[in-house]
């Protein structure tokens, strides 16, 4: 266990300041590689991006930096052991593939020709996620330079996948295949953001996702509603009744056992959420919506961050063309997704849904349920020592208190927690205006360097406080 | 008021028997005209069909037979006044247009080249509706021949429209335009059928129809269910909640005031329905369905014939393609139809629906309701003297007791009751196996001549009993 005192902040900052141009030159080179994983025509670019990153990590000082094959696009793995055998090991997760981008979609400059304007770097992948991966090369070097170390205070591993923008189809298999080499005490995900430019925040968890399709079959063909309507079961009506019955009048999910095991928000976390400068009207506008509505007893942020939900993603049955058609439809379909939170059991939810649907449908309606899969939720409790380290490191870098958020979406971060069995921390410095998946994606350069600074402090703090937590 | 005794049945039968070949030759000529109103390329054929019918009615003896123009296909009107100025006037309704037909759809012979096989005449329009229109020319001549009259015992008018298979879009306007010339004491619709080959039945009413589309608008675009799900209103969920709330657990329609004014089934009518040789399993198979389901407290026949219903004809919203898509949809749509029965007020139902929908939707969901129109229900009470006349006439023709049915569908018959303000009788001899709108449509020739015989008796009976009822 290292007892090295935290390095003077000025040394870390000075190093990062000195390296600024060189770092941006590297990042710019990487951003010029259009590593669009969704485009088969860009497969070579995705591989070039992996090769570029592995070489850069070796140049940074990582003794090990390898390109790992998957059944899809390649990932990059790197490892830099600590010189303290008792130090914890941290795995940094990010991705080197990017969303598609076309100048014609409204870009003010070429998406793969990075351009610095007003302290921002504009390019596809600047924030999501190349900028946030690469700041770790600067962070670890600042950490070493400021402390005089030759190896990081924690064992450092990086796993940078190449298919995140395509739904990470081979990621769980990759994790299982390399579980031994990926073994660690905590994961740091750098693929998220903070509340806003002025509010450094740490995300403490993501929701999981279980989604499915329910097909309902009634008459073998559409039939005349005059001759038969009102006397035979109608699959469109039954689809509607299922979808409607998923929530009660308080918009609480009615599926039996759905809330079993849910890790409830603590009073502390609710109070911390409530301290965030949240403008609900602006949030509703950002949601392209016209009101809020959700589980009674919870605020909007609590609903999207910390409460499990059931959502109708699609419903269809019978005639949907122009005008009317007086039929009893033959079939109907429901697409449902459930966002889950820590403590819930996806398999039990799926089983409960199967039973619930079967029990509710009348005779004469046949059904099939197809589950598309499940992404697990993840949550690191506020009191976790690693979370405290991250909070302190970020607070030092930003010079102001750090707030806590969660993420309502679902992602491969949960696979890391699930397969590796360790807590996941989120160190992200992107802001909502960065335009992920949109034209004119950018990253705020000052925040990028704050990210590197946070990492530099974090490795020291984790080494110092890991077992003390 | 005529007091002529009913003609001996044998005279009517003998006349019809003698005319059999000539009648079939006429019918065959008419069926060769492919008067498909839905096909703009057949507009000339529809007109040729109208001209053919007007000429045939003149040849039958109608002093007046005219082609009436509409904004669509032409109708045919004919009139043969009674020689008794006190006699009631009856208007016969039918249509001379037919459904499309293509040999390749599974016809065993050309649909517009009538073929007689095993006592049946196969052709598009044989039963629906040319055969049933044309038997009236034979009926009135048999009536005259058997009674020695030179004019029918009732004033006889015919209105044979040319767009019934296209939804009768110009029919109400036609009725209103010519209301004075169409004035009558009762309407006889010959465009329906009887229970089966062995069970002569009289239909006493049809359900009405009011249908609409409800469009629901939530977010201005599909939004991410992870970022926003569970905290903003979802139009697909709201569409489902509306559709589901239309019925309670007993499948009773919940729309406020929906049942106001409903003419309830009498014990007598329920008992008469129950006497019909109804095979529910066969009915379910005929409905291509796998169970019955409907308003509790009523039998299947009562549900489709005499109870008002609400049906979801279509529902759609959000993602309906393959796999899953984790969105909160921007829009959803419901297509609803209400079958109505005598005593209900379509305008009140529409107004109730407007209020009910507006009250049930949460803030943030905008909606529009579009009504496609309304067809009125019609019902002639069992005790009505004209219905008694028809029952007696049909019973004489078939030599067995007549049962009562209703029709669950909706049609222009109700417009006749509505615009002309007189009761509607249904004199139809088609049977379920006739294949309306299907390949190999046919009419049973024996039943066709029973139809003519019924008409021959009916004019006498109505004249004799009209005011005595």
Image (tube, coloured by chain):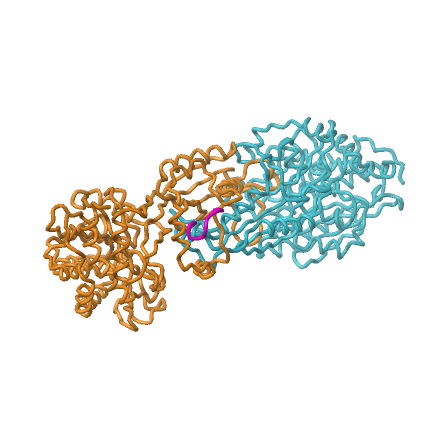
Chain colours: A orange, B cyan
Q: For residue A101, which quarter of the picture?
A: bottom left
- Between B296 and B205, the residue placed more toward the observer is B296
Q: Is residue A8 left or right of residue B116?
A: left
Q: Residue A270 appears at what percent x and percent y?
A: 40, 50
Q: Is residue B165 left or right of residue B2?
A: left
- Between B107 and A363, the residue placed more toward the observer is A363
Above or below A50: residue A466: above
- Between A258 and B235, the residue placed more toward the observer is A258
B18 inside magenta stretch: no
Extent of the magenta region: A295-303
Q: Residue A21 appears at what percent x and percent y?
A: 19, 70
Q: Is residue B454 visible?
A: yes
Q: For residue B408, which quarter of the picture?
A: top right
A296 inside magenta stretch: yes
Q: Is residue A298 left or right of residue A131?
A: right
Q: Residue A84 appears at what percent x and percent y?
A: 11, 49
């Amino acid at each position: 266990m290292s007892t090295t005192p935290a390095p003077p902040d000025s040394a870390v900052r000075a190093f990062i300041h000195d390296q600024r141009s060189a770092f941006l030159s590297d990042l710019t080179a990487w951003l010029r590689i259009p590593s669009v994983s969704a485009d088969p025509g860009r497969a070579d670019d995705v591989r070039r991006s992996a090769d570029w990153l592995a070489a850069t990590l070796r140049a940074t000082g990582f003794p090990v930096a390898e390109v790992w094959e998957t059944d899809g696009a390649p990932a990059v793995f790197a490892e830099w052991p600590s010189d303290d055998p008792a130090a914890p090991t941290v795995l940094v997760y990010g991705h080197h593939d990017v969303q598609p981008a076309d100048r014609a979609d409204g870009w003010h400059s070429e998406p793969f020709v990075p351009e610095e304007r007003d302290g921002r770097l504009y390019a596809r992948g600047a924030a999501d996620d190349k900028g946030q991966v690469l700041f770790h090369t600067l962070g670890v070097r600042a950490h070493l330079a400021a402390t005089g170390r030759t190896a990081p205070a924690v064992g450092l591993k990086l796993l940078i996948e190449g298919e995140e923008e395509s739904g990470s189809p081979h990621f769980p298999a990759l994790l299982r295949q390399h579980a031994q080499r990926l073994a660690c005490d905590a994961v740091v995900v750098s693929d998220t953001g903070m509340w806003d430019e002025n509010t450094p925040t740490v995300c403490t968890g993501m929701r999981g996702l279980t989604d499915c399709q329910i097909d309902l079959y009634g008459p073998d063909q559409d039939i005349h509603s005059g001759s038969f309507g009102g006397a035979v079961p109608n699959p469109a009506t039954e689809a509607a009744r299922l979808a409607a019955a998923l929530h009660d009048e308080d918009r609480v999910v009615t599926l039996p056992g759905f809330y079993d095991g849910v890790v409830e928000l603590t009073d502390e976390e609710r109070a911390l959420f409530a301290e965030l400068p949240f403008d609900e009207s602006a949030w509703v506008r950002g949601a392209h919506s016209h009101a809020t509505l959700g589980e009674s007893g919870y605020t909007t942020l609590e609903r999207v961050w910390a409460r499990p939900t059931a959502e109708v993603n699609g419903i269809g049955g019978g005639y949907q063309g122009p005008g009317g058609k007086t039929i009893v439809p033959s079939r109907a379909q429901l697409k449902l997704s459930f966002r889950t939170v820590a403590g819930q059991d996806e398999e039990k939810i799926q089983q409960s849904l199967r039973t619930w649907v079967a029990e509710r449908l009348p005779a004469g309606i046949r059904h099939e349920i197809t589950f598309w899969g499940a992404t697990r939720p993840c949550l690191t409790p506020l009191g976790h020592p690693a979370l405290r380290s991250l909070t302190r490191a970020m607070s030092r870098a930003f010079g102001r208190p750090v707030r806590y958020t969660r993420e309502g979406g679902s992602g491969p971060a949960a696979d890391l927690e699930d397969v590796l069995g360790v807590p996941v921390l989120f160190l992200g410095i992107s802001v909502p205006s960065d335009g992920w998946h949109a034209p004119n994606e950018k990253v705020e350069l000052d925040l990028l360097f704050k990210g590197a600074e946070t990492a530099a402090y974090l490795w020291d703090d984790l080494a110092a406080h890991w077992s003390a937590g």
